[in-house]
Amino acid sequence: MEGGGSAEDRFIARFFRPIARSGAALGLLDDAALLSPTPGTDLVLTKDAVVAGVHFFPDDSPASIARKALRVNLSDLAAKGAAPVGALLAIALPKGTPDAWMAAFAEALGADSLAFGCPILGGDTVSTPGPVTITITALGEVPKGTFVPRTGARPGQAILVSGTIGDAALGLRLRQDAHHPAFAGLGEAQRAHLLDRYLHPQPRLALAPVLRACAAAAMDVSDGLAGDVAKMLKASGCGGHVEARRVPLSAAAAAVVKADPSLFAVALSGGDDYEIAACVPHGRVAVFTAEAARAGVPVALIGETRDEDGLSVVDAGGNTLELGAGSYSHF
Amino acid sequence: MEGGGSAEDRFIARFFRPIARSGAALGLLDDAALLSPTPGTDLVLTKDAVVAGVHFFPDDSPASIARKALRVNLSDLAAKGAAPVGALLAIALPKGTPDAWMAAFAEALGADSLAFGCPILGGDTVSTPGPVTITITALGEVPKGTFVPRTGARPGQAILVSGTIGDAALGLRLRQDAHHPAFAGLGEAQRAHLLDRYLHPQPRLALAPVLRACAAAAMDVSDGLAGDVAKMLKASGCGGHVEARRVPLSAAAAAVVKADPSLFAVALSGGDDYEIAACVPHGRVAVFTAEAARAGVPVALIGETRDEDGLSVVDAGGNTLELGAGSYSHF
């Protein structure tokens, strides 16, 4: 009997061994991966699952699906101030998934794992009667004691957010309802920008060392800015306010919101931004902003924490906006 | 707006926070878990997914499903000589999964994580239009440099296996075809034994230090003894032979095989054993066996590695048995 000759082994050898080049992956020939933690570091562990029809469209390209599956985890690492160390992949595939689909998925995952310095260390491949389901566990490291928690905000700190908010949620709307009048005035490049922000999260790993140096608390914005900031403040035992007009919008998002102001709530609470919200003591805001800019990440001051319960999102007139749930929930 | 008040957050708070009591889990209030590796250790990482209708029956009890999902990963750690450090869980649930199902799943997972010293550190809960899908990433540690690889076997070493082989595969047959004449002579306790071996893997964590001390190579037997040993030998660059009559069978399995000798092949290649196969230099076999017994784990010498390609499983007359694929494959 020849070992290592099962269809499953050949599948792994064909699609995943080429992208698992780290020594820690042991050539995917073992039951497990082997990692020597860097002395003086703490490990940061995160695990996100994405399901076809829930987190992505079944007809999204396999390359886009691979990128999203990995990057949503890298975004969590970035928010904690961590640098990626490696990732494990579990993929459940319907029988009959074309080889070309798998090849494109694995190639994109390999390219992203190289680009973001996060080698694929191992995992599991199983069949499912259900939709494609991808679970990635990402490991990162921080110098000992420098993990940036969600719970460290205190009253009287600045609330900042990276990049622009709402593009992904509006991109999803555009994809679902391309002929909605709010999108009529957009040029091709602006449409492409919104669609791409939904498809391809850009984890803010460059911000990680800046967060470690300056932030009291941080989290990535995945389920909607308003809900996620509220969650961070509640976990920290305080509240706060966010000024809606200070929330940074891309030119495309601003055009959409101008055409249909009701979509501002979608931008503020729609999710899939994969930006980072942080609470920073006022004395560190100038350094935080300057260092973020040096790292290539624009950040904007959007509000302040307060010694109260709950988060208010207020408009230019000081009125509290009604944002519904404020964030996406599976249940 | 109240943060942390989404249905998803309440779901996590209700079912998972009570079982995630380790400090590293940060109360499941953060984006990630935080772990300080023990100085002088290497990390061992493994990730297995189980899918309803593929790896377990959709009507298995949620407690049994939870145990299987965790224990198949602990079995991988044991085979590498590792002690558990913690685990991350991703669970994809159909909408409308009863709360009672989740409560029973979480309670059993919590109990197992305590019993095996493997705290739940975090994870993800998502909805799916497909079957229940559970992915667990388990982390273990070994003293630096003592990881037991799959690739370390050399010609002329003893092949040993823990416990008994075939119970789970025969238990699955019994469950699928309870009136098959091969099972007619079994008593109730023997039937219960076979069914339980299929439902509830018993990870051989007690064997981990013995493997570190004595084994050149090891892997857990999850896809069938014959195929898995062949895989280990191929990964090590050698071959070998296993004497079928030396493979340890429980009284129940022996009775079934006696009643229907064609089921011997099922026992040898059916999988779900979660025992450990190891290659041990002959000079260490006595120590290995004695230390395993002290750890409460019976081990049996079943064959020898050779400087050749492939594994032969031979009967008492020296004839090679035909076992078909020799192991389970998803593809």
Image (cartoon, coloured by chain):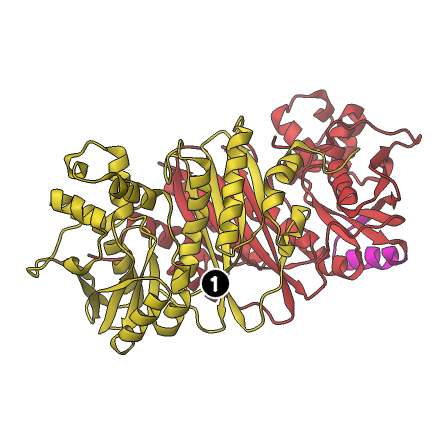
Chain colours: A red, B yellow
- Residue B253 lies in the magenta stretch: no
Give the residue at x 31% y 64%.
B235
Residue B210 lies left or right of residue B106; in this view the side is left
The quadrant in which the N terminus of chain B is found is top right
Tag 1, which secondary structure? Answer: strand
Indicate the position of residue A28 as horizontal and vertical percent values. 40, 59
Visible residue check, residue A169: yes
Q: Residue B23 falls in which quadrant of the image?
A: bottom right
Q: Residue A165 falls in which quadrant of the image?
A: top right
| Nearer to us in this view, B54 or B199 | B199
Indicate the position of residue B27 as horizontal and vertical percent values. 66, 48
Q: Residue furthest right?
A: A317
The mark tally for this picture is 1
Give the residue at x 40% y 31%.
B59
Disc 1 chain ID = B
User: Given the image, on which type of amino acid does mark 1 rest?
Assistant: Ala
Residue picked out by circle 1: B83
Give the residues drawn in magenta, as a range.
Answer: A283-299
Q: Residues within 10 Å of mark 1 (few under 14, many from 20)?
A: many
| Nearer to us in this view, A310 or A35 | A310
Give the residue at x 32% y 66%.
B293
Indicate the position of residue B16 as horizontal and vertical percent values. 59, 42
Q: Residue furthest bottom?
A: B283
Magenta: main secondary structure equals helix
Indicate the position of residue B200 as horizontal and vertical percent values. 38, 45
Residue B325 lies left or right of residue A13; in this view the side is left
Q: Residue furthest left?
A: B317
| Nearer to us in this view, A307 or B202 | B202
